Image: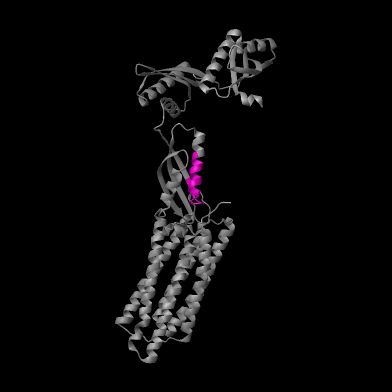
Amino acid sequence: MPLRRNCLAHAAISGDNSLMSGIPAISSPERMRAEKRTAAGNSVFAALVITGLKIAVGISTGSLGILSEAAHSGLDLIAALVTFFSVGVSDKPADADHQYGHGKVENFSAFVETGLLLLTCGWIIYEAVLRLFFRHIEIEPSAAAFAVMLISMGVDWWRSRVLGRIASKYDSQALEADALHFSTDIWSAGVVVLGLLLVLVGRTYRIDWLRDADPIAGLFVAGVVISVSWRLARRTVDALLDAAPPGVRSQIQDAVSHVDGVLEVDRVRIRRAGNRYFADLNVGLARTVTFQRSGQLAASVSAAVHRILPDADVTVQSLPRAQHTENIFDRIRAVAAHRNLNVHDISVQDFAGRRHVEQHIELDERMSLKQAHDQVTELEADMRREIPEIFDILTHIESEPATIEPSEELLNDQRLERRLKKVAEEFPEILDVHDFVFKRVRGRLFVSCHCTLSDDLSLSRVHDIQTELEIRFKQAAPELFRVLIHPEPSTDNRR
């Protein structure tokens, strides 16, 4: 089951170092969609009720603070509706037209909410300035006004906790924006209640300047809304513009650079769509690694990224790089690998500072001599160009089998086997030869056997012994067409 980091969006945007903290398991997609839509639906219902109550009480009391809260709640209702529909769309899987999924809908929803909040600010500030300097409106701080505001604070506390829990669980930016929004609504509603209390105190004790407490409270609400809007605007614009979360890129670079086999981290790009991150990396690998090893290293790089962004979609592109530790043999193989060719039995000799290279290459047996020669000529030109110290190159062309050869028969030739064992006794380093197999293929005689040697012999010496033994076998039995010898260490042969 895939894992997702708890509160990843908040931690990433705030630059929190807790990205490496606990990681809860992700529920099934169906359950996730159901929980997100339920939380968003409850928020819509609560916003509808609270907005209606605030409008009714605000009109009856004439309180700008309550009316501004009503306007605020009205936009909360619109924002909650946008969130409700966005979480339904954002969780749809990727399709042919939306290869990165539909997660950006959540980011767009948060952006729309930011615009609505700013509209609220404009209206509240405009009305507050009018009431402070141009027209005075009597406020009736009734018990109903206080009751509605206290109920509003309770409802906002409840839904901010519910939305925050679901947003944290599923890393939903839209729900997290709503949760943050409603948590600040508690404080702005408290300021309105304080403004109504000050108006009531001013009326009771005939303190005229306290009559301005209500529009001032409205201005404070506008300030809170601007603060929330600014925070949401930065986050949503960053998400829509594919800004990388602060600190995450450097964490990924550090983690990937410690992967064994990665020479460099050339580029790291991170983008977010809804609750999903996408990471694209270019990493430098030794140009001599095989295609299979390159795939293994790409998997290790992806695992390193997933330790930081557990549910990220990771794309790794490997770039071939020359190592400072490469010798001339590595460089020769690298040039051949660049042309998707394989060279072996490379021999390099130094004559008065001039490097002479001899090598074997296998090409498809179905190629003509002209085609094979042209391909080798181009390869040798590449080698001279990239390795200037090479003076000349001699390439032995071998045919690489392209068809499966049918074996005509297996032979049991005891006399030939004894003759070959006698030849092996000429080599003091050979401890034993066994498991002889004789077969006839296309009218030619093939032989294979196992050869036991000392454990501590160097591989180069083992190769020399094999070559010499093959030559002696063919001298002793000219009818042999091909000889294959498999070397074994003495400890392995004793088991």
Q: Nearest the camera: 346 or 82?
A: 346
Q: Quadrant of residue 379?
A: top left
Residue 72: percent from left, percent from top: 42, 73
Quadrant showing the C terminus: top right
In the rendered image, residue 349, in percent from the top left (x then y), is placed at 41, 18
Above/below status of 371 relative to 194: above
* Front-lying residue, 5 or 126: 5
Q: Is residue 34 magenta?
A: no
Work out whether residue 47 can be spotted.
no
Which residue is farthest bottom?
A: 205
In percent of width and height, residue 88 lies at 53, 60
State the image coordinates of residue 280 (x, y, percent, origin top left).
Answer: 44, 46
Q: Please say if 77 is above or below 203.
A: above
Q: Residue at x 49, y 34 (%)?
A: 291
Can residue 145 be seen here? yes
Q: How is the image coloured?
A: one colour
The stretch in magenta equals 297-314
Q: Which residue is more in the foreground, 57 or 228?
A: 228
Q: How many marks?
A: 0
Rendered image quadrant of residue 42:
bottom right
Above/below status of 398 relative to 280: above
**Quick one: 358 or 67, which is closer to the camera?**
358
